Each structure stands twice: as structure tokens, then as C-alpha cells.
Amino acid sequence: MKKIAVMTGGGDCPGLNAVIRAVVRSGVSYDIETLGIRNGWQGLVEGDLEPLFGESVSGITSLGGTILGTSRTDPFKKPGDVEQIRNTMKTYSIDALVVIGGNGTLSAAYELAASGISLVGIPKTIDNDIFGTDLAVGFDTAVSIVTEAIDRLHTTAESHHRIMVVEVMGRDAGWIALMAGIAGGADVILLPEIQFTIDEICQDLKARYLAGKKFSIVVVAEGTHHEDIAEVTVPECNRDDCGHEKFVGVGNLLGKELEHRLSIETRVTVLGHVQRGGTPTAFDRVLATRFGIMAVEQIVAGNTGCMVALQGNRVGTVPLRDVASRIKPITPDLYYLAKTVIQGRR
């Protein structure tokens, strides 16, 4: 093993630079040269790479985003792109790839691995919905950011006797909403995995009001749908390059409905991309470092076509075939935990 290349694909998140640093530093210890691929799969298709040394990744652990840039390019979308990836790897004499990404990036990685390209995946996403790993890089930081926001909204909600609706990220899985909602003491937590009606939500909030609680915090994941809110058709111009829906604001729809039905002043805060930005937590920095080192170790050992994963306190690996095109939903025990705490607050 002489040369590897590392890339970040999909949405950015805190902790990516800590992974890159760990991959480069670990490669140095094995006398392996590391190249950085700019802008995800796009850089591998276009041959846009740069050499990375120990000095070039010094001091980047605390930086948010990714020094390599990222994109949502799908290498299987355009004919010829996969062949271009093979040509780039041959031109630069790359023996294996370290692919840092979420569900879309890792699904593409699985297909490339199945076609014979040596690579190891590293899970990153603030949504924490990657199958096979307890946690992904970026999730802990996002939960910390949302929890702090909920803490701040508590004071203004209580002062003005308002309902505060907080919309957070979570397309198909409500991990951020659930964990930050529990940590921040939310009064209602709404998730894509659990179907609610507005009538049910209003009953819960009205019960709080009648019990003397004159304010409420409602945390809702962006992918949550309600049976009695009219579905919003999303035009093609409001979808990203992968066809994912750019959400138009379930928080605002919910806020209007709650204020109309309960006649209680309601305000909506959409945290949006602030959840992705900024300095990673200490936990994410350590997790990223463990993942980066493990990925290089697996390449050296010849164990490719896998993804590194946190299972309990141990970092191991799972086959990419078990990860691709699967979503990790909220577990019933965690949702029951949230319901128990919320019911106890009324």
C-alpha cells in the first residue's frame, strides 16, 4: 500500500476536518502518501486532487466544514463518470479511497466497491440515520447546538406566555429532534417516524395550559408530516441534485395551525443550516479521530468494502452492503423515554 485518497461528500457537518487529519496522520505512520479529493465525487471524476501532508492538516481539528470542499454529485448519474473515477485513480496511482459521507455518498461507495474499487467508508451526518453505527460524525455537535437554542427559547416563551415551535433538521429520521428535545426539556417532540394529527398535538398543549403551564416548546423534525395539514407539493426547482426535497417549512405550517386552533400566541424558529456549522464538540473530534485511524488500519489490513462504525464504546466495521440504501429510524425505547419525560412535565 503506497497511496490513498480521502474525500468528503454530501452535506457538510462539524468534525469532517478532524477525520481528514486523522487519516493523513495515520497514513504517515504507515508510510502511506495521502491525497485530498476536492468537492466529493466531483473531484474524483474531474481529477481535482491535492497532496496532503502532516503539516497541511495541522490545527484543523477545531474547524467546522471541510477543507476539501464537498458536493452532492452522484457518480452513477452521468454515463462515463465511473470510468473517469477509475482513470483518475490509475493516473494518480491511488490504491484505495477513504470515503467520508452520509447515506447517499456511502450508497455510491458500496456500488463502486462492488465493482472492484478498494475503499473504506466513514459515516458522517448530523441526522445520525446511517444504518450500522450508533453515532455518526457531526451528530453530537448538532444536538448540542439545538439544545442550546431550545434553552434560549425557553426564557422568551415563558416571559411572553407563547408556544415556541422549533424546526430542526431530520428528513427521514428524527434523531436530532428527539435527543435535543429530551435534553432541552421540550413539551412536544414530533418525528417523521411517528404520525400525529394536529388535534392530538392541540389536546396535549391545551392540557398543559389548563394545568397552569402558560408556555410550551414544540420541537419538530423537518420531515414530519401530519394527517390534517394539507400536503405541500414540492416542485422540481425545490429539490437538490440528488432529488431530495428542499423542505418548505413544516414548522411554519404547524405554527399557524396551533395559533389558529388554540388562540395562543405562537412563534416559529427554523434553525436550518446553523445546525451544520461551527466548531465540533470534543466528542465529535474524538469520534472523528477514531474513525479516521480505523479506516486507514482497515485499508492496510486489506479489509475494504466496509464502513467503520461505533457500536457501544467500540469502533469496528460493518459491510457497506448492509449500510447502502438503509435508514436507521428512532428506536421505540428512546421514543418511550421521551414520552415518559414529557408526560411527567404536564
Image (tube, helix red, strand yellow):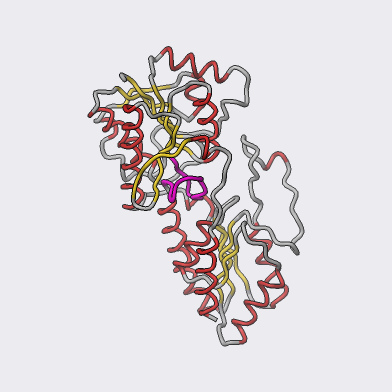
77, above or below 126, in the image: above
Q: Position of residue 30 (x, y in %)?
A: 24, 26
- Residue 270 highlighted magenta (yes or no): no
Overall secondary structure of the magenta section: loop
| Most foreground residue, 223 or 158 | 223
Q: Position of residue 247 (x, y in %)?
A: 64, 50
The C terminus sits in image quarter: bottom right
| Most foreground residue, 316 or 84 | 316
Q: Which residue is drawn at the image coordinates 29% and 34% (left, top)?
A: 57
- Residue 133 highlighted magenta (yes or no): yes
198, above or below 344, in the image: above
Q: Which residue is drawn at the image coordinates 59% and 81% (left, top)?
A: 208
Please give left or right for residue 279 compared with residue 176 in the image. left
Q: Which residues are magenta?
A: 123-137
| Most foreground residue, 47 or 176 | 176
158, above or below 246, in the image: below
Q: Position of residue 193 (x, y in %)?
A: 62, 57
Q: Position of residue 178 (x, y in %)?
A: 52, 62
